[in-house]
Amino acid sequence: MFFPEYRKSNVKFINWVSIVKVFLDSIKKIISDSALVYLALISGVSAIAIVSFQLQRGELNLNPLRTGALFFVSIILFFGARRYCDREAFKLSFLGTMYVIIAYLAWPTRYSWTVWHDQGYFLRMTIELSQVYLNSQNFITGVGYPLLAVPFYWIMGNDALFIPNLFAFAGTIYFSFLLFRSITNDSVAKIAVLFLMFATTFASYYIVWWNHGIVIFSLVLATYLSTKPPSARNLLIIGFLAGYSFFTRYADVVLFLPTLLYVVWRTKMKGLIFAVVGALPMILATLYAQWIVFGDFFRIPYLFQTAPFRLETIPYNAFLTILYYPADLALSDPAVGVLKMPVLIGTFFFIMAPLGAYILWKSKIKRGLLLVLITTILLTVLYSSSYYQFHSGSFGQFPADFRYILPAYPYLVLLSLIGLLSLIGMYQTQAPMRTHHLQQTSQTISNHDNLNKGLEADEN
C-alpha cells in the first residue's frame, strides 16, 4: 500500500525487436538493389586496398574507439538518408561519397597540407576554435568552414577538415541531380552528374582542404529551393545559405544574386524580406567575429585586403578561361598533388554551353531558371577574372586549374552536355521526365487494378 501500483501500460520500453526488424528490412531492400550492392562491393574492395597501401607506407594512424564511433554514426545516417531521399539521387551521392573518401585516403600529399598556405590556416583556425578563441594572425578568411570542422576535430584530429567537404560534396551531387532533372530528363541529369564527378577536377577541391565546397553546396541547394513553392521555410533557408556563404567566403555571396533575384521575381517583396531575415544571423555572426578578434566590426581578414579585385585583369583572365590549357599533359603535379585537366579546360565549355543553353531556351522549359544558370555562369567568370590571382593557387605561371570558377562547374557541365548531345543528335527537346515518379504512379495504378479485379472475383 505504500508503493504505487505497477501498471505496465504506464511504462514505455524500447521495442528492440521492431528496431532489428526495420534494420533487416533495410538490408533486404539494399541487397535487392543491384546498383547499391555493386557500389558497396567496389567501395569495400577499394577501401581495403587503400588501407593496405597506407599500412605499407606507415601512414595509417586511426584511433579505434573514435573511428568505430564515427563509422557507427555513418551507418545510422546511411540508413536514415536512404529511407527519406530520392532513390536515384541517393545512388549518385553515395557513389560520389565513396569516391572522394577513397581519393582522400590515397592522396599523395595529404600529410603536407598542414604547412600549405590556406590549408595550414584552416587547420590552425579549427584548432583555435575548438578551444573557443581565435588569433588575429590566423583569422585570414571566413569562419564558416573551420567552424563546421570543430566537432570532428575532437574525434579525427587534422582529418576533421575533410568531413565538412565530404558532406558538402554528397549534398552538391544530390541536389545537382534533382536540379538538373527538373529541367531535363533523368538520363541527361545522371550523365551530367557523373561527368561533373569524374571528367572534371571538381571533386579534387572537396578532397583538398579548400572552403569552396561549402559555398557551392549552398548555391546549388539555394537554386534548387528557388524552383520549389515559395514557402516561408524555403525562403528562410535560401537566405540562410547565402548568409552562411558570406560567413565562409565573404565575396562569394555575390554569386547568389541571380538566385535571389529569381526568388524576388517569383515572390515579390515577400521573398526579399524572408531571404534577408534568413541571412541576417550569419551576417551578424561575421561582424561579431571580427569585433571579437580585431576589436572592430568592419575590419575584414587580411586575405581579403591583400587579394583585391582588379577590373583591368578581367579581359585577360576571361580569355584564359576560354583558351587556357596546362603547360604539360601530366594528370597531376607531383609536388602538390593537384589534379590537372588533360584537355582544354574552358574551350569545351565555351563551345558547348551556349549551344546547350540555346537548346533549352528553345524548348521553353523553365526559362526563368535557365536564366539563373546562365547569369550565374557569366557572373562567376567575370567575378573570378577580377582576381589578380586567378589560378588554383601559388603554383607558378601555369596553373593546374581555375578554382575560382568552381561554383559555375555544375551549370557549365549540364549546359555543355546538352549542347554536345544535341550536336551529335542524341538529345531531343522534351519536357522533364521523372522516371521514378512515373514508375511509382504506374505501380499504384497496377495495384488498384489488381485490387478491383480481386473484389470483382469475390463478388462473383
Image (cartoon, grey):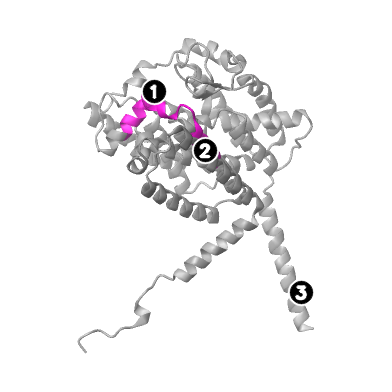
Tell me the mark number nearer the camera, choosing from 2 and 1: 2
Residue 149 visible in the displayed image: yes
Helix, strand or loop at label 2? It is helix
Q: Is the magenta stretch mostly helix, strand or loop?
A: helix
Which comes before the other along the chain, label 2 or label 3?
A: 2
Residue 364 shown left or right of residue 129 in the figure: right
Side of 96 where 114 appears, left or right: left
Label 3 vs label 1, nearer the camera: 1
Query: Furthest residue to the bottom?
Result: 1
Residues in magenta?
A: 97-126
**Cα–Cα gap, marks 2 and 3:** 56 Å
Image coordinates of residue 288 in percent, x first then y, are 27, 34
Which quarter shows the C terminus?
Answer: bottom right
The structure residue drawn at horizontal position 49% and vertical position 66%, both measured from the top left corner, is 20
Q: Residue 230 in the image: state x and y as whole percent.
A: 51, 46
The answer to which of 238 and 334 lies nearer the viewer is: 334
Q: Say which label, 2 or 1, has the lower sequence index.
A: 2
- Where residue 153 sits: x, y (%)? 34, 40
Q: Where does label 3 land, which residue?
A: 453
Residue type at numbered disc 1: Trp
Q: Which residue is drawn at 25% across and 38% down?
A: 131
**Residue indicated by mark 2:** 50
Checking the image for residue 116, the label placed there is: 1
- 148 vs 313, nearest the viewer: 148
Residue for point 34% across, 26% down: 121
Q: Do the residues labelled 2 and 1 touch (CB within 8 Å)?
A: no
Task: Reply yes or no: does residue 399 show up in magenta.
Answer: no
Disc 2 from disc 1: Cα separation: 24 Å
